Amino acid sequence: MTLNVTPELGVSLEDEVGKLKLPERAAALAKTVDKLEEHGLDVTPNEDDKDVATALATSYAQNPDKTSQKVTNPKAATLTPPSIRLTNDILTEFNHSVVESSKQLRNLVTNKLIIESENPDPRVRMRALELMGKISDVGLFAEKSEVTITHQTTDDIKEKLRGKLAKLVNPDPVIEDAVVLSAADIDIDVELGDFDDE
């Protein structure tokens, strides 16, 4: 059933709900799950619920618009309450974590590299040390390039340009005469060396 909110514009409630992004839809559905839980619904997730929530969150991370379009009202209605809650929790954490914990992630990666630098395998140990050296704060292996800027006046640049253009327009007529050699003038043994019969 479609409810027309503003008939003159042709906008319906169903159209507006269809445009929801997955995090907004999951948050709205999770509020319903919270109400149902208050009235005794068991929302303990099983492995299938975890798999569904993980798949939705992963798909959303890879392509938010496409995933949001795929999770329509009929498809959302097939989700179990635990999978809805897990999806909402993952998406909420995902949205906050990306912004808030980039420093924590940097620290985590650095700490893991420090642990790997003690690995008994020399290849793993060397790679961990190399990656730690590339951290911007350390900068041991950072490739640096120096740029030298030579300041010139406009008149200097114009003069250089005129000189180059003049050489292109009026090249120096340096033409050398060809040297003609006859076959008698060339000693093949001297030019190519002696060849043995073998």
Image (tube, rainbow, N blue to C red):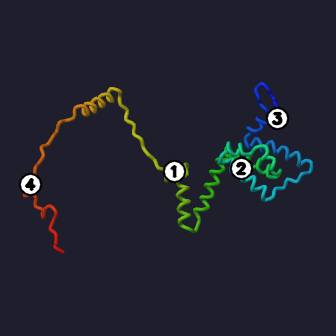
Check disc 4 and report the residue beneath it.
Answer: 182
Do the CB atoms of the residues marked 4 and 3 lie less than 8 Å apart? no
Residue type at mark 3?
Thr
Do the CB atoms of the residues marked 1 and 2 lie less than 8 Å apart? no
Residue plotted at (85% across, 53% down): 43
Residue type at mark 1?
Gly
Do the CB atoms of the residues marked 4 and 1 lie less than 8 Å apart? no
Mark 4 burial class by Cα count in 10 Å: few <14, some 14-19, many 20+: few
Q: Where is residue 194 drawn, in percent x and y?
A: 14, 68
Give the number of the mark in front: 3 or 1.
3
Cα separation, mark 4 vs mark 3, equals 100 Å
Cα separation, mark 2 vs mark 3, equals 29 Å
Q: Secondary structure at mark 3?
A: loop
Q: Secondary structure at mark 2?
A: helix
Mark 3 burial class by Cα count in 10 Å: few <14, some 14-19, many 20+: few
Residue plotted at (79% across, 32% down): 12
Check disc 1 and report the residue beneath it.
Answer: 139
Cα separation, mark 1 vs mark 2, equals 35 Å
Upstream in the sequence, badge 3 or badge 1? 3
Q: Which mark is residue 2?
A: 3
Q: 17 left or right of 163?
A: right
Q: Where is residue 134 drawn, in percent x and y?
A: 53, 53
Furthest toward the left, the residue is 184
Upstream in the sequence, badge 4 or badge 1? 1
Q: 48 left or right of 162?
A: right
Residue plotted at (46% across, 47% down): 144
Upstream in the sequence, badge 2 or badge 3? 3
Give the number of the mark in front: 4 or 3.
3
Mark 2 burial class by Cα count in 10 Å: few <14, some 14-19, many 20+: many
Above or below, comparing residue 178 to residue 14 in the picture: below
